[in-house]
Image (spheres, grey):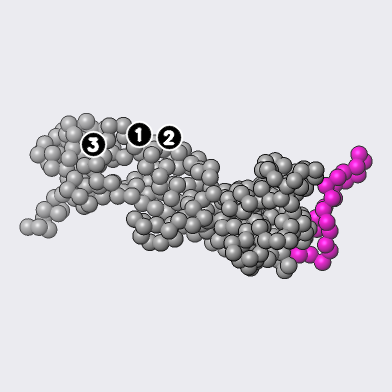
Amino acid sequence: MKKMTKIALVLISLVCAVCAFAGTDTLTACGVPQIVCDLFGASSGVLTAGTMLFPVTEQQTGIVIAYQNKKMIADEVMPIDKLEGKELSFKYFKRTLGDAFTVPDTKVGRASEPNLIHLSGEEVADFVVAHGLEDLIPKEDLERVVDMSRYSNTRLEYMMNLLLLGREKEVADIVQNTSNYGTGCSHTYENAEGMGATGFDIVATIMEYLEKPFARPNILGMGAAAYHKLRMDPNVLKAIYPTSNGSGVATRQQLCELFEVDKIIVGESRVNTTKNSKTPTLERCWGSNIWGHYQEPLSSLKEGIAWGITAQVGDRIVEVIDKPEKGLKGSELVKVGFYQKPVVTAKDAGFLLKNVVKTA
């Protein structure tokens, strides 16, 4: 009996599909009783799938793709090179220090050619990693929402913010790892050393390390604690105002001009380092470190020079999945994510000063 019932349901489904394909307005016109339509949740005799309450339109998809938290700096530190297609493997050109070492000169004469930086390297194969989060929302909750569009936008932004915080932490760990820099291009300070210690000159130190990589860094990055200390350091202020007494506060633009870099990036993000969200232990992602990277504006995984780049396959993803078995009225599962992998492409194009603020 059960077997015959299953066969009958399959046949009814096939008839429904044929009717829908043929443009028939009602299932009863095909000989399907109205009670069967009601059983399957049909409206006006038409058999339809359950309506999703959580809207994902072009607007919501655009929000997920474009969303960014301006206090997070991962995309500036290791810019995204978006790869087309669905292949999760990729190749990048890993720069190595060539036989000839040339300090780049960007000045070009009226009838001369720009100088070139000659590098050697190797092609490396790698894979992007799936990063995603999902949120299960009972339909009872969705039915109480007055402005569903605003609710969905807020929910998607919140989920993307958590995803990007994870990316921020991942990139920060890569940047602040001394093994990702060339020989002599990193230094870790003890608690009693660094800015604030007697006799320590941060201006001379940064100037020295700017010349160590094979390509002079054009971007300086640092954690908020290091930036706060740097812009009030007496040696910095005396270098900017030679006749001053070493007090005051330097602007970001003045620091760029002092160290002759294009940009200074400051990381302010914090992350909870404990599993218990009720009693969090918040720590700064970027610590009290200063780093310098060389980064060409149009650099990619295979062209140009950049200390680090992030490979990304396709756009960010957003999806809503019906979960009728979750909750009395069912639920909707909202999923967001992306496929990415940050890679260091030229470890000799940067430097790292770790724990550069005196703590003892």
* Numbered disc 2: secondary structure: helix
- Disc 2 or disc 3, which is closer to the eye? 3
Residue type beneath disc 2: Gln
Would you say the magenta stretch is mainly helix, strand or loop?
Answer: loop
Q: Earlier in the sequence, mark 3 or mark 1?
A: 3
Are discs 1 and 2 less than 8 Å apart at CB? yes
Is 155 left or right of 139, judged from the image as shown? right
Relative side of 345 to 68, left or right: right
Residue 296 numbered tag: none
Residue that mark 1 sits on: 149
Viewer-proximal residue among 137 and 249 = 249
Above or below — where is 195 with respect to 155?
Answer: below
Q: Label 2 vs label 3: CA separation? A: 22 Å
Which of the pair 43/123 is nearer the observer?
123
Residue, disc 2: 59
Q: Which residue occupies the extreme right position in the image? A: 111
Please check the rendered image and state whether residue 90 is part of the magenta-colored stretch, yes or no: no
- Which one is in front in this view, the residue at disc 3 or the one at disc 1? 3
Give the magenta part as a residue range.
94-121
- Quarter of the image with the C terminus is bottom right
In this image, 75 relative to 166: left or right?
right
Circle 1 — which element? helix
Hey, what amino acid is under mark 3? Arg
Give the x, y percent position of residue 355: 61, 62
Q: Residue at the location (39% across, 57% down)? A: 280
